[in-house]
């Protein structure tokens, strides 16, 4: 399920507030928020509509293109390649984005005058953090009325979309005034632009605050002095032109991370037996020694491997311990063992009322639901 979220980027910044300037227009980013699993290699984020109601790209042309960079924060990366660089094995095949007229006033014989390649995705590579969109046609010429060209305004706006399937793109554009019936490659092939992201190495913390959980986009607009967008072997080698918009201190969420499918992609399983009849008297102490927040999934079992309960817990960084009293766990008196899925550096210890301590051991993911309870050392 997705929810809608809006942010405007315009020509003025005052006290970190967003100000839409009617005389100059704005670029508005409208997103839906997709639910994504943290620490997963392929997850679908939400959708992005970019709505333009001014002449921000007046200087753009095929010879002097402008660029929009759509960058993901939290070290989230693109999970697939849709447009590779020139000279790559796959070849460089830009995507022409269908642009449609969005009017909130009578059009009065207004016509769309945009070229099919006016707005293109020209870089979208697996393992990189940004999508690059190139503007090849002056926004001063996108509309025409009575033989005279004009730019979009707050009554007659231009909208294009990414993060959608090919049929959804066709549904958006083929029955309205648009320069294309759908997003298509330069060879005419229909194309899906769904936002598949890789969160395995991200700094997302799904049990934290929205600031920690959300996948945000950070858009930037650069002029024609931008170089190497379609040829740089790595995105860090791109030469940036002059920024054309003030950088705003706002987040534009397009995804929200959750803990899901944890045992499929976490790096370690810690397991340990529980003393018969005394489990409820103990506490589990977990320590995350890394420099970033983490979490763990805890499950406890009967002697024959039947799952009794499970819980997720957030872990602070830099070694601050988290103590979890076992007495608060469902049916813990019947439990013979427990398992903790977490990050590779996770440490776990069981401490009981009699002062005994049992360290959890790293264990294979195979067969972890059946753990035989050994007699701990020092007991009779």
Image (cartoon, rainbow, N blue to C red):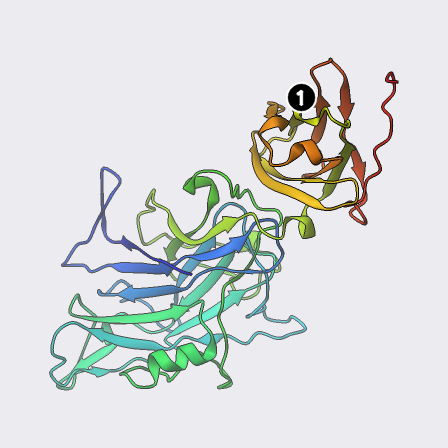
Height in image: 157 above or below 296?
below
Q: Position of residue 274 (x, y in %)?
A: 76, 30
* Residue name at image x 43 percent, y 58 percent: 69
Height in image: 47 above or below 340?
below
Q: Nearer the viewer, residue 27 or 364?
A: 364
Q: Which residue is mark 1?
A: 281
Q: Position of residue 355 (x, y in %)?
A: 73, 13
Q: Nearer the viewer, residue 12 or 347?
A: 347
Image quadrant where residue 337 sits: top right
Residue 170 lies left or right of residue 20; in this view the side is: right
Residue 116 visible in this rendered orientation of the protein: no
Q: Position of residue 380 (x, y in %)?
A: 88, 18
Q: Position of residue 267 (x, y in %)?
A: 71, 44
For this orientation, the residue located farthest to the top is 355
Q: Nearer the viewer, residue 148 or 196?
A: 196
* Residue name at image x 47 percent, y 44 percent: 213
Residue 345 lies left or right of residue 72; in this view the side is: right
Residue 145 lies left or right of residue 48; in this view the side is: left
Q: Nearer the viewer, residue 217 or 244?
A: 217
Height in image: 43 above or below 323?
below
Image quadrant where residue 181 sits: bottom left
Label 1 packing within 10 angstroms: few (<14), some (14-19), many (20+): some
Image quadrant where residue 109 sits: bottom left
Q: Secondary structure at mark 1?
A: helix
Task: Quadrant for the N terminus, please.
Answer: bottom left
* Residue name at image x 36 percent, y 75 percent: 118
């Amino acid at each position: 399920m997705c929810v809608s979220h809006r942010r405007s980027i315009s020509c003025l910044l005052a006290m970190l507030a967003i100000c839409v300037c009617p005389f100059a227009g704005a670029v508005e980013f409208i997103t839906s928020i997709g639910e994504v699993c943290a620490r997963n290699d392929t997850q679908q984020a939400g959708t992005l509509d970019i709505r333009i109601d001014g002449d921000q790209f007046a200087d753009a042309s095929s010879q002097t293109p402008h660029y929009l960079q759509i960058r993901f924060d939290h070290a989230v990366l693109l999970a697939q390649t849709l447009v590779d660089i020139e000279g790559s094995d796959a070849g460089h095949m830009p995507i022409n984005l269908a642009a449609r007229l969005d009017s909130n006033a009578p059009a009065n014989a207004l016509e769309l005058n945009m070229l099919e390649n006016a707005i293109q995705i020209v870089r979208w590579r697996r393992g990189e953090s940004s999508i690059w969109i190139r503007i090849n046609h002056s926004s001063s010429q996108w509309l025409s009325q009575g033989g005279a060209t004009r730019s979009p305004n707050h009554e007659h706006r231009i909208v294009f979309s990414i993060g959608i399937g090919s049929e959804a793109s066709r549904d958006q554009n083929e029955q309205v005034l648009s320069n294309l019936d759908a997003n298509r490659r330069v060879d005419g092939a229909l194309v899906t632009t769904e936002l598949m992201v890789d969160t395995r190495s991200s700094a997302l913390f799904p049990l934290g605050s929205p600031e920690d959980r959300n996948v945000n986009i950070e858009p930037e607009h650069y002029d024609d002095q931008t170089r190497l967008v379609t040829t740089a072997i790595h995105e860090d080698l791109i030469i940036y032109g002059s920024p054309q918009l003030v950088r705003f201190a706002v987040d534009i969420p397009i995804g929200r991370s959750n803990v899901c499918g944890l045992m499929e992609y976490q790096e370690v399983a810690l397991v340990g037996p529980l003393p018969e009849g005394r489990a409820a008297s103990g506490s589990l102490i977990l320590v995350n020694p890394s420099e970033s927040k983490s979490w763990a999934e805890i499950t406890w079992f009967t002697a024959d491997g039947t799952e009794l309960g499970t819980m997720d817990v957030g872990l602070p960084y830099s070694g601050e311990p988290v103590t979890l009293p076992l007495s608060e766990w469902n049916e813990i008196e019947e439990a013979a063992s427990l398992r903790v899925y977490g990050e590779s550096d996770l440490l776990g210890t069981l401490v009981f009322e009699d002062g005994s301590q049992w360290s959890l051991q790293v264990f294979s993911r195979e067969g972890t639901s059946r753990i035989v309870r050994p007699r701990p050392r020092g007991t009779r």
